[in-house]
Image (cartoon, rainbow, N blue to C red):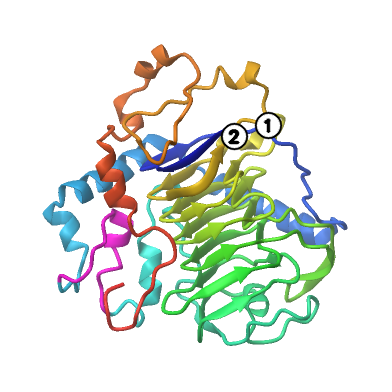
Amino acid sequence: MEELSFKILLLVIFVSSILPSHTRAHIADFDEHWKQRAEEAMKHVEEAYHHNPHDVTNHFNHNVTKALKGSNTARRNLGGNDGSCQATNPIDQCWRCRKDWAANRMRLADCVLGFGAKTTGGKNGKYYVVNDSSDASMLNPKPGTLRHAVIQPEPLWIIFSKSMVIRLSQELIMASDKTVDGRGVEVHIQGGAGFTLQFVKNIIIHGIHIHDIQKGNGGMIRDSVQHFGLRTESDGDGVSIFGSSNIWVDHLSMRNCYDGLVDAVMGSTAITVSNCNFRDHNEVMLFGATNGYTQDETMQITVAFNHFDEGLVTMRAYAPQSEWKNWLWTSEDDLLLNGAFFVESGDLKKKGSFNKRDSLAARPGKFVEELTRFSGALHCVENTPC
């Protein structure tokens, strides 16, 4: 276990991990509603899988290269820039430099890259304004609260009327086709439970703070307008992605959750985690549930432009050394600060067996500083580039 304070440019993952998990994940009564939701989700997972993953990585790397070179093509993506914006990576360059970002919030959905590139969230739906930070009723959420917003059946772009701190009494179970957009205010999800994306599709979570998350005790919780059911104790993840597809997690500031910050398990795929700031945690991300769950073989996740900040560790504790010593983990020109270090494993001679198209050519660590400097939730002001 090594304490880390470093920044990583890009990681594209196809992974099957080894932490045991239950296929029903906290659903005490796996009734017809959940059976149907799970069946539909698995169909969406199959449809979301990219059969030519190199095409995805090549497209991503092409955009990163343009951003690093400051090409004219990349600059054209900054429409409306008056020179005051300092967006430094291709995802941010798509929207941050526009003064009209608040009037055209849904344009954000056009900016995701990587395996989650087809995620649109609540685009083309209505806006839902959260104006109440309470979370008192799990069975009949109050209109105007975040819990009421995320269980609605239709696509919604969820925004906030003011800055607020929300303590979720139980895990926040989301319905499909939603965007949670915290730009323009400061929203903290803290001191209670976190987000649960279980058997859903097409979710964007952007621009909020998630920290000091605790386990939910479980109980009767509404998971849609039409259904509620008994849940067991939740894990205490910041964002839990379970059997879901087309998910984009962007510009979150995350720290100190009871379990993981971002977990993606049970065949989840078509995911991008970008521009986030992670700190003060020892289990930042988990991708994959168990070696015995074969659907994890199709898990495709892009992790890019995130800042792995102070108080983190790298862990292989869920596998014995006899197993992880064969995993090919390498570090090439990563920027390691404040005494951080990385232990390589596997047969390093096999490093050269990868086709160059599999990854972005390594660049000096100074580029990482540039591409991740605006990670985490941003302070955006209307009528001004963010």
Location of residue 120 with respect to 65 vertically, above or below: below
Taking the magenta stretch, the answer to whether it contains residue 95 is yes
* Image quadrant in which you'd find residue 177: bottom right
- From the image, tell me which residue sits under label 1: 318
Question: Over which residues does the magenta segment extend?
Answer: 83-99
Q: Quadrant of the C terminus?
A: bottom left
Is residue 59 something one can see in this rendering? Answer: no
Decide whether residue 93 is among the magenta residues: yes
Note whether 63 is above or below 135 in the view shown.
Answer: above
As drawn, 104 above or below 38: below
**Residue furthest out toward the front:** 339
Image-based side of 153 in relation to 52, left or right:
right
Residue 174, percent across and down? Answer: 65, 66
Q: Which residue is at 55% across, 17% downward?
A: 326
Q: Total marks drawn?
A: 2
Find out whether the residues at labels 2 and 1 contact each other: C-beta distance under 8 Å. yes
Q: Residue at 53% x, 44% y: name it.
A: 312
Name the amino acid, label 2. Met
Q: Quadrant of the N terminus?
A: top right
- Foreground mark, 2 or 1? 2
Rendered location of residue 210, percent (x, y) = 57, 64
Q: Which residue is mark 2?
A: 315
Q: Between 372 and 67, which is closer to the camera in this rendering? A: 372
